[in-house]
Each structure stands twice: as C-alpha cells, then as structure tokens.
Image (spheres, grey):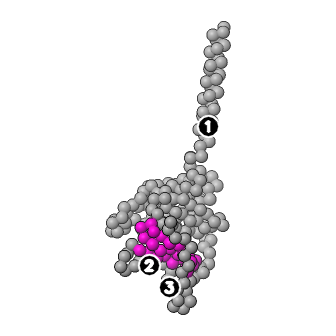
Amino acid sequence: MKGFIAFLLVLIIGLFAFASFNNSTTIDSSLPVYSDNPLIGEWSWDLDDSFFMEFNDDGTGLRNWNGYETFIWWTVGDLLRINIVGGYEEAQAYLATHNLSMIFNEHWTFTIADDNTLVIDSRQEQGMRFTYHKANEMPEPILPSNPLIGEWRWNILEDYVVHFNYDGTGRRGWEGEVEYFNWWTVDDLLRINLTQTPL
C-alpha cells in the first residue's frame, strides 16, 4: 500500500511539473506578436508615397521597390525582422548591376511617433534609415516644391550621398559615416544645421 501511495505521489508531482513546463512555454516574449501590433497597416515612404510597405495581421507583408516583394515579419520589443520570400527578382537584378547583394533576412529597429510616423534603422547596414507615414495620413510637406528634395550623389565619389527630405530633414555620408541635419533655402542660399554626427 505504501508503495502504491508513493507511486501516486510521484505521478502527481510529475504531472504538475509537466503542466507547469507546458504553461511556461506558452508565455514566451520572443514569439511573434501580431495582435494590436502598431505596425499593422500600410505605410508610405516619406520621400515618395508611391513606395509602400504593408504589414498584415497574419505575419505576412508586401512592399514595392523595383517590383513587388512579399515577406514574413515579426517584432520583439523594438526589433523588427523581415524575411523576403517572393517577388525579389527585380530588386536582386537591380542590386547586381551595382555590385551589391540582397539581404533576405533583414534586421531593423523601429520607432513610431504620433501613431503615424514609422522610422526603421538597419541593424546590418550602418546609417540606413527610412521614414514612413501611415497611408492616407501623409503630413503636408513643408518644402513641397523645393528642387533639392531627393537623393544626390557626388560626381567624384558616387558612394557619397546627400538626402534632402521634404519635411526639412536630411542626411549625408557614405559607408556608415552618416550625418543628419535640418535644412532650408532662401532663394539660392542653402542652410544646413547638423543634428547628429557619427560617433
């Protein structure tokens, strides 16, 4: 009888431990989170709203850059992972003409301001940053007709790029050495105030 009671006691403890283990595995902060994720929806690039990224609530996504790419995505805290799964042939061909290779498993950090401005920073390419706005919620441009808006490459060193954003912000640099600035013009005068420089 004592042996049977001991057996039952061991069985009960074992079942309790198993149930506790199973319960703990269902609460894992590293698992993808989609419910109420602030990224869900369509986001338009601030420099050209014809370029967009769409995050679906089932963990799939779509973006257009040299063709349409499909991807799966998830977040952990402020970390965003994007794995390209289809439609990348045009982008891959474009990069190949510039002796660049495509990153299929992208690592980003992201911030969202005022519920409608998304900024993503690459954890793989230093200085690579993009700003998006919720579709149909694009703010009015501060500098809508300024001819400087866009990307400019130095004719002596093409890797050196200057970006003038329509909202009066910008960045310049090459190979990860990037400076961020605010800018404005008065007639043919250009003012640039640095806001962040490389460490």
- The answer to whether residue 91 is seen in the rendering is yes
Query: Which of the pair 150/174 is nearer the observer?
Result: 174
Amino acid type, label 2: Trp
Left or right: residue 94 compared with residue 131:
left
Left or right: residue 27 compared with residue 154:
right
Query: Which of the pair 197/15 is nearer the observer?
Result: 197
* Residue at numbered disc 2: 152
In the image, residue 166 lies in the stretch drawn in magenta: yes
SS state under label 1: helix
- Pointer 1 local density, CA inside 10 Å: few below 14, some 14–19, many at least 20: few
Identify which residue is drawn at 61% across, 63% down. 112
SS state under label 2: strand
- Pointer 3 local density, CA inside 10 Å: few below 14, some 14–19, many at least 20: few
* Residue at numbered disc 3: 147
- Counting residues from the start of the chain, the first of labels 2 and 3 encountered is 3
Mark 2 or mark 3, whichever is nearer to me: 2
